[in-house]
Image (tube, rainbow, N blue to C red):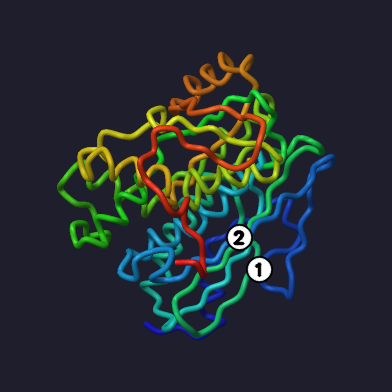
């Protein structure tokens, strides 16, 4: 069933819930929101385009999930609690079944993370999803990219490279991203590409022990480079310390797995720095969250990112307009 613009908006609005911090939600020219006392707002926006950020044949529920996950990952990297978001959809055709499935994925993650959809826009055009997400963080407690200090340990969460590994398999015609696949290693990688899990709980916990943080969306080397550049320091990475999953090694082999981990994007893990005396606290945090946290390098004097033991060369990660 094809929908007009207002029927489409109403279909999304029916999925939202009333909340005390939403004075006025979907249905007017703008939303009215009520931040909590003493909180600063963290605002981020991401656009996902078919064929660039996800395979065009992806299941609509996966597209909805991933579109929100990219924004939640930014809030996680800032140590912000997700609060509200707007959704702008460009669709070639407004089909009811597609929209319902898309909303299933988006609202599954929205409800789990406590973020509310409060407005947006719809238009006809190539498939594209733009979300602006707003979080709250106590004044002066936000994690930033410019706080790394010489002597800090460099840490990364999870197993970077798995999403890039799935993308590589798909590009080689070895992975169908539309649904569950039989091969266990391939399915793990497919899930990491199509249903990334933003590390919101980790970001909140890192307020008390991290000096700087960034989410890994463009590749570990590239995003660590943002921390180094903003902080005016050098980052020295140990390639053999980067945690590669068994699934990634099995699917691609060791060399390609490391390349994906260092230069692949879409993992939405967190890379952060913390003082050496906080190692025990970080390890305790890993146990509390049941999330692997690996120490992969150190912050030093100088500039740039230096990866010891990396046989690769060339680009450090994904850059739009440079590919």
x then y, percent, for residue 77 = 61, 42
Q: Residue 284 carries which label?
A: none
Indicate the quadrant where residue 210 lies.
top right
Q: In this view, does 21 lie to the left or right of 306?
A: right
Please say if the residues under marks 1 and 2 sit with CB atoms less than 8 Å apart.
yes
x then y, percent, for residue 68 = 52, 56
Among numbered discs 1 and 2, the one appearing first in the sequence: 1
Find numbered disc 2 in the image and state the secondary structure of the residue it sits on: strand
Local crowd size for mark 2, using a 10 Å CA cut-off: few (<14), some (14–19), many (≥20): many
Q: Name the residue under label 1.
A: 26
Furthest-right residue in this view: 38
Quadrant, the C terminus: bottom left
In this view of the protein, which residue sits in the foreground, 25 or 225?
225
Q: Residue 117 carries which label?
A: 2
Question: Which marked residue is nearer to the observer: mark 1 or mark 2?
Answer: 2
Q: Residue at x 47, y 57 (%)?
A: 318
Q: Residue at x 23, y 45 (%)?
A: 252
Quadrant, the N terminus: bottom left
x then y, percent, for residue 119 = 64, 67
Above or below, 95 relative to 256: below
Q: In this view, does 194 lie to the left or right of 254?
A: right
Above or below, 198 relative to 153: below
Indicate the quadrant where residue 203 lies.
top right
């Amino acid at each position: 069933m094809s929908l007009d613009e207002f029927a489409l908006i109403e279909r999304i609005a029916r999925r939202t819930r009333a909340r005390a911090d939403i004075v006025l939600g979907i249905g007017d020219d703008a939303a009215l929101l009520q931040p909590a006392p003493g909180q600063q707002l963290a605002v981020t926006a991401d656009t996902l385009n078919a064929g660039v950020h996800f395979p065009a044949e992806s299941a609509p529920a996966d597209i909805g999930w991933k579109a929100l996950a990219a924004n939640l990952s930014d809030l996680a990297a800032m140590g912000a609690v997700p609060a509200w978001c707007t959704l702008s959809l460009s669709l070639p055709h407004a089909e009811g079944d597609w929209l319902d499935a898309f909303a299933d994925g988006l609202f599954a993650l929205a409800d789990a993370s406590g973020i509310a959809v409060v407005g947006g826009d719809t238009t006809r055009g190539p498939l594209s999803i733009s979300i602006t997400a707003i979080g709250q963080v106590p004044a002066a407690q936000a994690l930033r990219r410019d706080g790394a200090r010489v002597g800090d340990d460099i840490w990364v969460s999870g197993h970077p490279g798995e999403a890039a590994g799935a993308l590589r398999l798909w590009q080689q015609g070895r992975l169908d991203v539309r649904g569950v696949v039989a091969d266990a290693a391939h399915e793990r990688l497919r899930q990491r590409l199509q249903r990334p899990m933003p590390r919101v709980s980790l970001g909140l916990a890192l307020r008390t022990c991290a000096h700087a943080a960034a989410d890994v969306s463009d590749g570990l080397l590239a995003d660590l480079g943002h921390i180094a550049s903003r902080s005016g320091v050098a980052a020295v990475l140990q390639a053999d310390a980067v945690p590669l999953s068994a699934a990634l090694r099995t699917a691609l082999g060791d060399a390609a797995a490391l390349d994906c981990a260092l230069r692949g994007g879409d993992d939405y893990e967190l890379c952060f720095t913390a003082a050496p005396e906080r190692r025990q606290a970080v390890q305790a945090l890993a146990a509390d969250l049941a999330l692997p946290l690996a120490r992969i390098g150190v912050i030093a004097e100088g500039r740039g990112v230096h990866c010891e033991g990396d046989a690769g060369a060339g680009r450090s990660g994904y850059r739009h307009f440079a590919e």
